[in-house]
Amino acid sequence: MKTIRKIGTLLRQFTHSSPEHSLSDLARATGNSTSGTHDLVSGLVDIGMLQKIDRGRYRLGPLISSLHRVLEDNSALIRVSRPVLDALQDEYGETVHLTRHDKDRLLVLTAVEGKRNVRVTTSVLSPATALHDAPPGLLHLSTFLQHQRETYLEALPTVVRRAAREDLTRIQADGYCAGPIHHEDGVSCSAALIRNHANLPVGVISQSVPAERFDTQPRAFRNITLEAAHKISAALGRTGTVPFIRSNEH
């Protein structure tokens, strides 16, 4: 824990007005020895969080820039999605999630718990949820490049892999997926893909509901979720989209 705090203090020394520091500067700022600071800095250089620009002098590295872009993307997605998530919860009272993926796991950006007497908790989706175990994850998986998708699928048991591969073809075409969440008995999830101005997939919005409630009106949940994804995509600048809702679906 002390090491983590020292790393945080060290990184905070790099500001707009002071973008460059020597090893001795950083040692004084962290209260660490020069040799100990050298070990910290060397590790941060190895992973790209710092870069050496001259003998004994450092700046922030390329990984910081990459993480900043991810943060900006996620922040924009959360900002434009929040009114839609709140409106869904207000009107229908179900639990809503906004997700991205982190390799083979779900990344929950934000969630709003339902307000109905019988409802699903927001913890039903988490980083512990494998992509193939829930509709939002399957949607994310459907956006993988072919070789990435196959690498993921090859690690699954044969029966699971075959079923997932068949599902992904349909899911990719629909931009929608509904079904149970693995290890969550009595819960159904309705999920739709969000795209940005360049038509690239950037997230998934989903509603998690008691299965009995979902089974009485699956088409309504489909339409509601797809329409929510459409609104968020439009807010991100996607234009000329084909309407999501298919009235002839049952």
Image: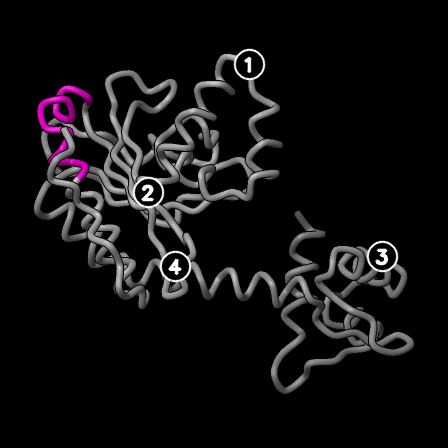
Measured as percent of width and height from the top left, residue 104 is found at: 54, 36
Q: Give the magenta range.
A: 211-222
The Cα–Cα distance between marks 3 and 2, rounded to whole angstroms, is: 47 Å
Residue at figure coordinates x 17%, y 37% from the top left: 94
Determine crowd level at label 1: few under 14, some 14-19, many 20+ residues with C-alpha closer than 10 A. Answer: few
The Cα–Cα distance between marks 3 and 1, rounded to whole angstroms, is: 45 Å
Q: Which amino acid, by three-letter code, is at mark 2?
A: Gly
Q: Which of marks 1 and 2 is nearer the N terminus?
A: 1
Label 4 SS: loop
Residue matched to label 3? 39
Between residue 170 and residue 159, name the one nearer to us: 170
Residue at figure coordinates x 46%, y 66% from the top left: 72
Residue matched to label 2? 175
Q: Which of marks 3 and 2 is nearer the N terminus?
A: 3
Which circle marks residue 199 in the picture?
4
Residue matched to label 1? 158
Q: Is the magenta stretch mostly helix, strand or loop?
A: helix
Which circle marks residue 139 in the picture?
none
Say whether residue 216 is magenta: yes
Q: Which of marks 3 and 4 is in front?
A: 4
